[in-house]
Image (cartoon, rainbow, N blue to C red):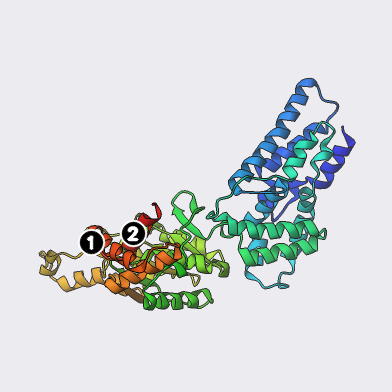
Amino acid sequence: MNKEVQSKQEKFFHLERLILFRNIGADPLLKEFKSLLEFIGRDPLQPDQVLLRDQKFYRICSDLVQEAEEHHWSGNLWHHYLTRLLALAENAFSRVGARLCEGKIEGSILQLAWHDLSLIQGIYHFDFRSLGNWVPAEIVDTIEDFSLPFQHEDWEGNYSEENMSALQDSFNQSEDPKELVKILAYFYRKAGFGPMCLFSSFHWQDEAGLAGIPYPDPIRLKDLIGYEDQKKRIIDNTETFVGGNRANHMLLYGERGTGKSSTIKALVNEYRHRGLRLVEVHKGQFASLPVILRKLRDYPQRFLIFLDDLSFEANETEYKYLKYLLEGGMEVLPDNVVIYATSNRRHLIRENWQDREGGGEVRIHDSLSEKLSLADRFGITVTYTSPDQDQYLQIVMGLAEQNGLDIPPEVLKEKALMWERWHNGRSGRTAKQFIQSLMKR
């Protein structure tokens, strides 16, 4: 057996000895790497075994490059990969570290974290060149100093990769496992763990659970012009919530295209650094709301459940799941969750004249109350009305300034009024579409 390789394997790659960070021990790429170490640690290899050895090595390199392309990595790909595994870990240490202040982690969890980090440190600093002279130096150099020719500016990972790069730098500068435990705990408190450190916005998928949105709408509150009173009410409630206090559920009701959904999307972009996350749930998933809430309860972040364009037909009953959760159910909403919904209907559920006439029902008032009470269970209702002409032009002028359009104001106003007459009427959406039409020229 190759004594040098055997020594490094015994020193560094005891993946099976990990306790808290079992996700790293179970990772396919690291298991493949350990398999490679075991393979080349045998007696001198036969020609067919040399080919198999090479296949294992180059497959690992290929996997690292694919990860780099997906996550926009530059620099040492091996370090990036290990750092990402640590960041994604959901275990007793990451959960405790995310919730407790610095210096409060102690006892059993701390001892186990020291144990695991001492093993992971050896894996992290492993030198590919020590595998033997058969390893091409130019390949190792490329893996350790990788670069990509481009990066999407609006990619959600830009923020998370900044946090993980800082974590990676700290790992490069420290050799003390006890110091690494503090560094990692600080990362979990600041950025979160698991998917929370990678994404600010999520879809719910009934089979997969929380699915991060890699390219969310980048809109910010400063981009939204007009509706200042409405924005203030929404921001005040959100500030209360992000500050760790109980806040009201909110219903944003009004005309289409007035910026209701955009305002909610802008909130998570504004407050993600303070731990705010958004989970978009569709009407057909309301039966899964209890499962979603139990999942979110495990994280220290604050969550907006976003119900966009909420409305129900007379024969739909999904609203009862929502009504049950908003008030009156045995299972209460977690303190770290509020529901923000938008709708074009004030009372959310379609109401027909037949409903008011009774349709044969003896106690028609009870039936109407059942349908109308859902909207009442939102603590705050914010109304968005269509802008008048002056408000519409104010939005147009603001968007033109944001986008650097150099058009005389009177010409811009004249064109804007003509656009709204020929298109969808006055609204923030119409103003945005008008500005976009000018930018294409």
SS at mark 2 in the image: helix
Amino acid at circle 1: Arg
**In the figure, is residue 409 to the left or right of 174?**
left
- Picture quadrant of residue 143: top right
- Picture quadrant of residue 40: top right
Between discs 2 and 1, the one toward the N terminus:
1
**In the figure, is residue 150 to the left or right of 252?**
right
Residue picked out by circle 2: 434
Up/down of 138 relative to 432, above or below: above
Whole-percent x and y of residue 280? 43, 59
In which quadrant will I find the N terminus? Answer: top right
Whole-percent x and y of residue 423? 25, 58
SS at mark 1 in the image: helix
Residue picked out by circle 1: 421
Near-viewer residue (424 or 436)? 436
Residue at image coords 35%, 71%: 394
